[in-house]
Image (cartoon, rainbow, N blue to C red):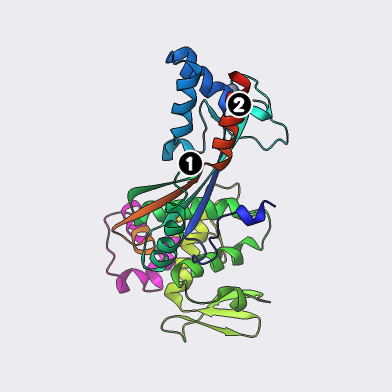
């Protein structure tokens, strides 16, 4: 019954929680603590049980020993070849701090306080720009950029982030197209199978699509087709986006940076990490009993 032990993040707005998962090899950890650091197995065991990896180790796209990533059903440790019973999965959830997540986060953390051995919580100072790029990375992984449907999915994800209170799943139900509408000063309107966005909002959605796809093989694909950076910027200028937001810049790169700041938002925020240590502790115990 794995389901009942899962943490519940359903009260958080879409896009505000990022999941990371990594495998750790306990044979490697025991090796480090006993051979390299020189601890007796008993002391190594109690040290390892208390150990919580760093945010970097838990979330890095490139795992280093004793961490590794594998999609295989029965993976072997890439460093020491240890079999599955030596591996523990560490799942980490990162909650973006802010008005819309404060209440559900406090509620969740209250339940976790009683289980501080199983769940580690870590706060990290950051800023909106970093949060925006983390969100983009996660979004990119969730989209299939080879399927044309991703363009609408990206608009939906962007609107969910921008206006988390709206039920965008019903707005996008049966939707065929997203278009700009100069009739709208701001916001959006659905008509039949089409969603009309105010020009500024539409251009922001294009910027998000550009950022999601610029490193993909097609590069910079948007609802307006493939756009180069100068074309995207020209569009923003022509649509009055730059003047409306008071954006001026000496060159296109500075302009691009300022546009990203406008869409990402600026200022500090905090990340709140929840590290699920349950499998780790369980495996450390079983591995130690084999050691002792
Ligand atoms: Zn190993």
Quadrant of res 131: bottom left
| Relative vertical location of residue 165 with respect to residue 104 in this rendering, above or below | below
Q: Quadrant of the C terminus?
A: top right
The number of numbered badges drawn on the structure is 2
Q: Which mark is residue 287?
A: 2
Q: Which residue is drawn at the image coordinates 48% and 72% (left, top)?
A: 202
Q: Is residue 243 magenta?
A: yes
| Relative vertical location of residue 107 with respect to residue 68 in this rendering, above or below | below
Left or right? Give the position of 117 relative to 265. Answer: right
Q: Which residue is drawn at the image coordinates 46% and 61% (left, top)?
A: 207
Q: Which mark is residue 59?
A: 1
User: Spatial distance from mark 1 to mark 2, Cα to Cα?
Assistant: 25 Å
Q: Position of residue 90 (x, y in %)?
A: 55, 40
Quadrant of res 264: bottom left
Q: Is residue 228 visible?
A: no
**Is disc 2 surrounded by few (<14), some (14 to 19) or many (20+) residues within 10 Å?**
some
Ligand 1 placement by image quarter:
top right
Q: Position of residue 85 (x, y in %)?
A: 67, 29
Magenta residues span: 232-259
């Amino acid at each position: 019954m794995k389901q009942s032990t899962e943490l519940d993040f359903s009260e958080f707005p879409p896009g505000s929680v990022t999941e990371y998962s990594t495998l750790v090899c306990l044979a490697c950890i025991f090796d480090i603590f006993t051979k390299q650091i020189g601890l007796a197995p008993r002391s190594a065991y109690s040290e390892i049980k208390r150990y919580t990896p760093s945010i970097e180790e838990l979330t890095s796209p490139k795992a280093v020993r004793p961490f590794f990533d594998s999609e295989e059903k029965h993976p072997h440790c890439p460093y020491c070849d240890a079999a599955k019973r030596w591996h523990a999965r560490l799942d980490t959830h990162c909650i973006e701090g802010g008005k819309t997540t404060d209440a559900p986060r406090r509620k969740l953390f209250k339940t976790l306080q009683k289980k501080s051995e199983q769940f580690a919580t870590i706060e990290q100072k950051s800023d909106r720009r970093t949060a925006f790029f983390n969100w983009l990375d996660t979004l990119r992984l969730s989209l299939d950029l080879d399927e044309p449907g991703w363009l609408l999915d990206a608009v939906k994800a962007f609107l969910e982030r921008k206006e988390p209170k709206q039920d965008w799943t019903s707005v996008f139900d049966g939707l065929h197209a997203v278009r700009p509408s100069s009739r709208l000063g701001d916001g959006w309107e659905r008509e039949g199978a089409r969603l009309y966005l105010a020009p500024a909002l539409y251009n922001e959605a294009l910027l998000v699509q550009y950022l999601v796809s610029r490193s993909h093989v097609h590069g910079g694909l948007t609802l307006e087709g493939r756009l180069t950076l100068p074309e995207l910027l020209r569009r923003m200028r022509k649509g009055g986006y730059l003047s409306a937001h008071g954006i001026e810049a000496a060159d296109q790169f500075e302009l691009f940076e300022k546009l990203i700041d406008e869409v990402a938002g600026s200022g500090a925020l905090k990340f709140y990490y929840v590290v699920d240590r349950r499998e780790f502790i369980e495996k450390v115990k079983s591995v130690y009993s084999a050691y002792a």
